[in-house]
Image (cartoon, helix red, strand yellow):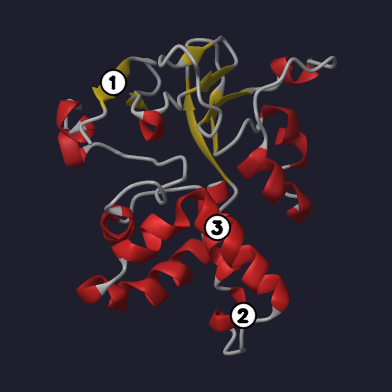
Amino acid sequence: ALIEQLPQKTKSRLVFVGDLIDRGKYSSLVVEFVKEGGYPCVIGNHEAMMLNAFEDSMQGQMYGNNTLRNMALWQRNGGDMTDRSYTGKSGAMLRPHLDWMKQLPAYLEFDSKDENGKSLFITHGFGLPFWEEREDPEMKQAFAWERLKDKCDQSYLNYPVFNVFGHDVQESALPLITPHYAAIDTGCVYEGKLCALEWPSKRVFIQENIG
């Protein structure tokens, strides 16, 4: 429904900020839509939890205690609904989807610049403070889990990139847009709204939760 609002609909250059799964009845179909559409997407913390839950089985091993704990964590955070979405015919999609999630990047950068000359930097969580360390493999979890905080050192505001990210639900159910970043998670999972940001205009498209 949100994509139908966009000027070019599915022909738009869509980019996804992760958390395609969990707490929804159609997680497997959402992943299939993004995967088969070849749309760029960064890894979210929910994809990371799902991968951790299936880590041993992906390597052909029996479930170990660590994997069982990871499975329980994922299930408590909406993984039970995702699990159910892979029953029946959708079950054949599970392994290809896990393989696809495993190769999702921690961040994406695009040369297209906004009115302030900043290029587009996409992460799942708030990634701007880590931009200079973006190639450090240890930063991958920070990009997926970091929330927007009032940090003392805000030198990152001078970086030449504009960070668009999800993960951090905005209580106003509207995106938070500043000259340096845009937090676009508007709480669809909590009966809120789904948001798309057009680049470089920063025009916002909002879709109410339709259940």
- Answer with mark 3 or mark 1, whichever residue precedes in sequence: 3
> In this rendering, is residue 19 above or below 67?
above
Q: Position of residue 103 (x, y in %)?
A: 53, 64
Label 2 element class: helix
Which corner quadrant of the image does residue 205 belong to?
A: top left
Mark 1 residue crowding within 10 angstroms, few (<14) / some (14–19) / many (20+): some
Q: Are marks 3 and 1 in contact (CB under 8 Å)?
A: no
**In the image, residue 191 lies at what x, y percent?**
33, 28
Q: Which residue is label 1 attached to?
A: 206
| Label 3 packing within 10 angstroms: few (<14), some (14-19), many (20+) | many
Element under label 1?
Answer: strand
Query: Dot 2 surroundings within 10 Å: few (below 14), some, or many (20 or more)?
Result: some
Three-letter amino acid code at the position of disc 1: Ile
Residue at numbered disc 2 = 56
Residue 74 circle label: 3
> Which mark is nearer the camera, 1 or 2?
2
Counting residues from the N terminus, which is met first, the one under dot 1 or under dot 2? 2
At x 47%, y 72%, the residue is 99
